[in-house]
Amino acid sequence: MGDRLKSMFERLAGVSLAPFWGTMSRNWILKLICLVLAFAVWQGVRESTSYEVVVQDVPVTITAGPGLAVLDQSTDVVSIRFRGSRDDIRFISRDQVSVEMDIADRSGRLRQTIKFSSRYVKAPSRAHAVLFQPSEVTVTIDREVERVLPVKASLEGELPEGIQLEQTVCEPASVRVRGAERRLINLEQVRTVPISLDGRYNSFKTHVNIASDGQAWVAMPDRVSVDLILEEHFAVRRVEKSLVRPLLASDDTRVVKIRPDRVDVVLKGSPQRIEALDTKDIYTYIDCTELTEPTEYEMPVRVDLPSGIQVEKIEPSVVQVTVKTL
């Protein structure tokens, strides 16, 4: 017991304790003090390295060696509990941590379960990975193949009313895709990440990534340009013999005569709005509020319309207006 205690103190102190170990061994009080000091040192070291942090959803990347590809893996993320000093764990984040497994030396088994361990963890810290959730990953391996597949633009959102998408052009129009044979055999095309159409009035060009949707294959190149050709589409409708009314103040008792009192109105708008338009919502009128003298005038015809509808033409656009007092 005494020799083991002596060796422990020499390791902690870093020097030989032989000169005074004999004295200490004969003094049980000194032995007790040394034991307490040793425990305090051990406790201090333990506490200084007992800080912990859990990093969620750490990405898991598995490579299978030449000519092989990962067909399936039971999880592509793992939660890791790190333990270390305060400084070691202070700045650990998901963006800095990854799990990378190279199973080329185990590729003889097409399906295998591998336990996570700290040797697979890549992190810019001296903190130690002590717990993984889940604790293991099951991997299925397949032969690696390469195919050339067309690219289709994926779209989201809605164009403004009256604007239509005429064409999308991807450049390059196709990409090489490499991955597990059984994963690619039924794949007919690849898509881009979604491109938003919200608020777009004019044609535009954008660069986007190929979306793998978490599948274990790689596209080359993994980024394409997409031209989106937009055009404004509208419908025209002719409303005939719309009655022209005089617009007067509520207390105005004058008599107003309009010649001709009916006009044709040509309207323009989106096909949906034009089709849904009710002629009762078309109000043609002459603004007589500023015609102060009882005489004849030539006045432009005005039209009030629902939102989204425009006046293309009024026939005739000017009429004769006679104002008389009672």
Image (spheres, helix red, strand yellow):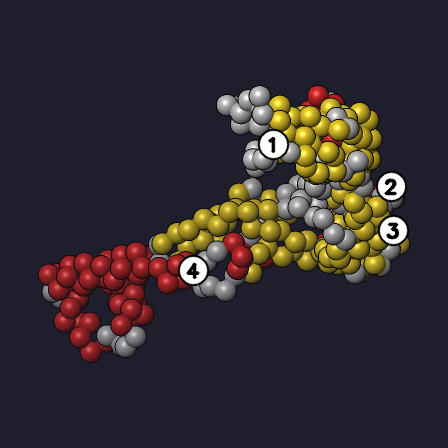
Spatial CA span between label 1 and label 2: 83 Å
Q: Nearer the viewer, residue 272 or 6?
A: 272
Q: Residue at x 75, y 55 (%)?
A: 204
Residue 241: percent from the left, percent from the top? Answer: 80, 25
Write down the residue under mark 2. 186
Q: Give amino acid for label 3.
A: Leu
Dot 2 surroundings within 10 Å: few (below 14), some, or many (20 or more)? Answer: few
Q: Nearer the viewer, mark 3 or mark 1?
A: 1
Looking at the rendered structure, the secondary structure element under dot 3 is: strand
Q: Nearer the viewer, mark 2 or mark 3?
A: 3
**Disc on res. 91:** 4
Q: Residue at x 57, y 21 (%)?
A: 326
Q: Nearer the viewer, mark 4 or mark 1?
A: 1
Task: Work out whether residue 9 can be spotted.
Answer: yes
Residue 106: quadrant of the picture: bottom right
Spatial CA span between label 2 and label 3: 11 Å
Write down the residue under mark 3. 149
Report if the CB atoms under discs 4 and 1 are less than 8 Å apart.
no
Q: Give amino acid for label 1.
A: Pro
**Disc on res. 250:** none
Image side of residue 111 versus residue 96, left or right = right
Write down the residue under mark 1. 294
Position of residue 188 relative to residue 252, above or below, is below
Task: Work out whether residue 35 can be spotted.
Answer: no
Sequence-wise, the earlier of marks 4 and 3 is 4
